Image (cartoon, rainbow, N blue to C red):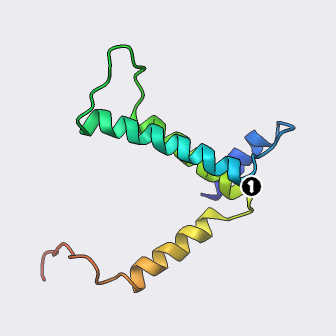
Amino acid sequence: MTQLQEEVNTYISQFKEGYFSPLAMLARMTEELGELAREVNHYYGEKPKKASEKENTIEEELGDMLFVLICFANSLNIDLEESHNRVMEKFNTRDKNRWTRIETEGE
């Protein structure tokens, strides 16, 4: 994750404008989430693409979301690996018995 954050920072650092403000970043993330939702709806929902619509993929839209998320974190000096580790700790402690586990052989 650190490598991804550094790569995005290197890219953004070449522009005078730098990172957008947190509010603008949130708007961009919302925009990208809408595009992801549209693609999911085309592939798995009841709204097929029009013949005139550009072929995007869920993979592309997830990539866009990830880029904006990394930009958002970088702009606020948030280490996403640390954030991830805190979330996993929460899932592995507080939520450890919340879901039905898949039984493994020998149980």
Please report the residue visible at 21 percent of the width from the left and 75 percent of the height from the top.
101
Residue 26 lies, with reference to residue 45, above or below; the image says below
Kindly identify which residue carries mark 1. Answer: 75
The quarter of the picture where the N terminus appears is bottom right
Residue at the farthest top position: 52
The quarter of the picture where the C terminus appears is bottom left
Tell me if 21 is positioned left or right of 61 in this view. right
Dot 1: element:
helix
Q: Is residue 25 visible?
A: yes
Q: Report x, y in % for residue 26.
A: 62, 51
Tell me if 94 is positioned left or right of 73 in this view. left
Q: Report x, y in % for residue 14.
A: 82, 37
Tell me if 58 is positioned left or right of 98 in this view. right
Crowd band around label 1 with a 10 angstrom C-alpha radius: few (<14), some (14–19), many (20+): some
Q: Is residue 4 visible?
A: no
Residue 63 lies, with reference to residue 71, above or below; the image says above
